[in-house]
Image: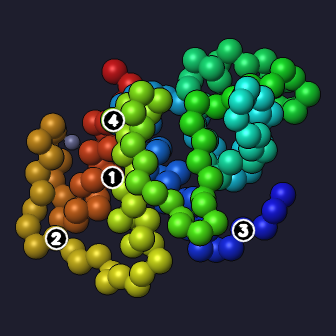
Amino acid sequence: MPLCTIKIEAVVAQIVSQLDRWNIQTRRNGIITSSQGGFDFNVSGKRTIDAPDVAFTPRRKYDSLTEEQRQTFKGEPFTPTFVGTEGEEHGWNDVSGDEVLPDFTLEVWKIDQTSEPSEPGEPSLFIIKCPRCESTFNSDYLFMKHYEDVHVRKLH
Ligand SMILES: [Zn+2]
């Protein structure tokens, strides 16, 4: 496995994080992998990529894999739906999911932000009331976490 710099890994982590939110919010329930996700690529007419920085495999495809495919590289080759690798010169470009990842847009400004110093989060000056239940919060982050965990991740 090639070694990656912390800067590249930070970008990959940010993309994985954005994909994960999309995966949850759209209830795709797919499988997101980062640099260490190994795939056996066999895409006709396109170049072969052994270990993409980021990949998305739909749940249906994952469920159809055999245990051998999931746990070893000996099974039939399969290909994730989406792969991304960082370009050597220009970095990541804005990516729209189109039909492959509907409603997913990679927010590059959030990636750019990871390499810049930032102020620590301020506590909110007002009380946030959850619109979906009776809970109240005095921090944006705690409210966001509550909303995602309780009202978004819930699978019904
Ligand atoms: Zn709530």
Which residue is the site of mark 2? 124
Which residue is the site of mark 1? 145
> Which circle, 1 or 4, is nearer the viewer?
4
Q: Is residue 122 above or below residue 49?
A: below
Cα separation between marks 3 and 1: 30 Å
Choose between 116 and 99: the one closer to the eye.
99
> Which circle, 2 or 4, is nearer the viewer?
4
Task: Mark 2 or mark 1: name the one nearer the start of the chain.
Answer: 2
Amino acid type indicated by mark 4: Asp
Instruction: Please give the name of the residue rendered at 42% of the width and 71% of the height, measured from the top-left corner.
Output: 112
Q: Under 8 Å from ligand 1: the CB of mark 2?
A: no
Q: Residue 4 carries which label?
A: 3
Cα separation between marks 1 and 4: 22 Å
Residue 139 location (% of width, % of height): 22, 65
Task: Give the quadrant of residue 116.
Answer: bottom left
Q: Under 8 Å from ligand 1: the CB of mark 4?
A: no
Which residue is the site of mark 4? 103
Task: Mark 3 or mark 1: name the one nearer the start of the chain.
Answer: 3
Instruction: Please give the name of the residue rendered at 81% of the width and 62% of the height, measured from the top-left corner.
Output: 2
Task: Mark 2 or mark 4: name the one nearer the start of the chain.
Answer: 4
Instruction: Please give the name of the residue rendered at 60% of the width and 42% of the height, measured from the top-left corner.
Output: 83
Residue 67 location (% of width, % of height): 80, 22
Instruction: Please give the name of the residue rendered at 43% of the width and 65% of the height, measured from the top-left corner.
Output: 111
Amino acid type indicated by mark 1: Lys
Choose between 154 and 37: the one closer to the eye.
37
